[in-house]
Amino acid sequence: MANINKILIANRGEIALRVIRSCKDMGKQTVAVYSDPDAEAPHVLHADESVHIGPAASSESYLVIDKIIEAAKSTGADAIHPGYGFLSENADFSARCQEEGIIFIGPEPKAIKLMGDKTEARELMKKADVPFPPGTTNALESIEEAEEIAHEIGFPVLVKAAAGGGGKGMRIVDEPSEFKSSIKGAKSEARNAFGDDRVYIEKYLVEPRHVEFQILADEHGNVVHLFDRECSIQRRHQKVIEEAPCTILTDELRAEMAEAAVSAAKACDYVGAGTIEFLVDRDRNFYFLEMNTRLQVEHPVTELITGHDLVSLQILVAEGEKLPFSQDDITMSGHAIECRIYAEDPRDQFLPSTGTLTKHRIPSGNGVRVDAGVEEGQAVTINYDPMISKLCTFGKDREQAISRMLRALDEYEIAGCRTTIPFCKYVLEHEAFREGTYDTHFVKALFDPGKLDELVDDEIQSIAASLLKLNKSNGETGYKEKTHQANGDVASSWWQKRRR
Ligand code: MV4
């Protein structure tokens, strides 16, 4: 048992803030680290102490193991929480913390390494009796070998990078003639992205749904699951909307998948919070896809349906405590949805839309939770992930969670950059989403940017905000009356539209 007194959060933005909040709930001291442009970021302002770790580039700040370790030592932090992204799934970082006598709030290097290698993970699932898509559990040696396996499992097949995940180094192959170029392409992409060009093949599942299970494990061999999340609404392998629980699972299938998820975690001697991703096909067969050895962006929807604080539990387990409950004590109720609000323009190919958030008024009310990493007046830059916030709603059932989400999206006021709010509204109002009949191809197949009708709304909001600012500064220079008039006009038409 190791009591943790002070935790360094090796991250930024909303997740750093999220971790700080649980630390405070538990009476733990907090240390933030920050790059040049983050000097006044919310995570720095909310932590008890902070350490500057370098310039904007992540490769020179948030990703530098030596700098993070040094910051922990100089502040006397006894543990490090990596959040998600950055160093969270870096086995060397977990190992280095161990060497330095600092508690890494996450799994052992062994589990990170194992699950980071998709061929090894598949091999492990074979032993653990967890189903995975048919194909090889070894890296490909030759085109002939690939053709042989494809002949066995049937086209289409997928060429995937062993070091991959998140869609990089992945190629669909529909017929033998495409093999050569697909393998070459996947290999070169994998080499560039991971410095590892090993690839393998597996059966390509058409129209699958992405369903994942949250698991938690302690050092004493206890492994539990906290049910499932549906994450099929993605674009370019980036999740946009998630919900819990998944609507297509029967109690029976849920129990079966949960058992497989727990087996997968046990197979790699997992400790901490982790996620087992599955694909579910049209016949409701499920297949292990990968394990994420970190806390996930979408963890709040699980917290909302189970009532448990996953970050506190991660910390508890890192202290060597036993899980405070058994599987039977964990129940779920109601329904939760998360919309990721990105600073991207859904009308222009989701291109990043940077700028200063001249207005950021988050929604509230019954069943609404917002995890934001940016505050009004702050700049959204291209240095980091363009996610502004995670807007979650909770309801007694899916229908209530959806109507609360639409209410919250309507209430959300952002000016200074374009956001994915209109896109989220589009999805939530779509028949396929309402009926729950969508799959991982939703955005590609069903999203029509021409149908976004809130352009005027957004633009007027942004003009109104700028004019309001202008109005304030002109108040000091004597032009108040004229701009006040203009501002009043715009503001009133904006309100009229909003009230329709
Ligand atoms: C698949 C698949 C179909 N069949 N594997 C995409 C990201 C990476 N984690 C794995 N991915 C997929 N693997 C087999 N055997 C389809 C996808 C996939 C996908 C998966 C989850 C959510 C969205 C997706 C979008 C396109 C493709």
Image (cartoon, grey):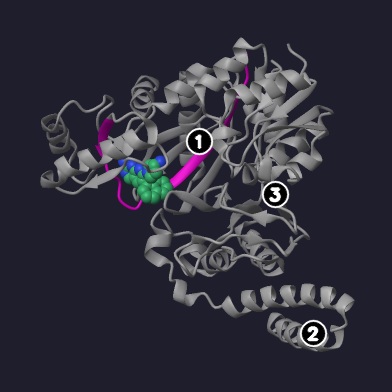
In this figure, which residue is indicated by the disc labeled 1? Answer: 255
Question: From the image, which quarter does the N terminus lie in?
Answer: top right
Q: Is residue 444 above or below residue 211?
A: below
Q: In what quadrant does ligand 1 lie?
A: top left
Q: Position of residue 171 (x, y in %)?
A: 27, 44
In this figure, which residue is indicated by the disc labeled 3? Answer: 371
Q: Which residue is drawn at the image coordinates 69% and 15% (left, top)?
A: 320
Q: Is residue 73 magenta?
A: no
* Secondary structure beneath label 1: helix
* Secondary structure beneath label 3: strand
In this figure, which residue is indicated by the disc labeled 2? Answer: 483
* Residue type, mark 2 in image: Thr
Q: Earlier in the sequence, mark 2 or mark 1?
A: 1
Q: Nearer the viewer, residue 169 or 336?
A: 169
Q: Which residue is drawn at the image coordinates 16% and 33% (left, top)?
A: 146
Q: Nearer the viewer, residue 19 or 135?
A: 19
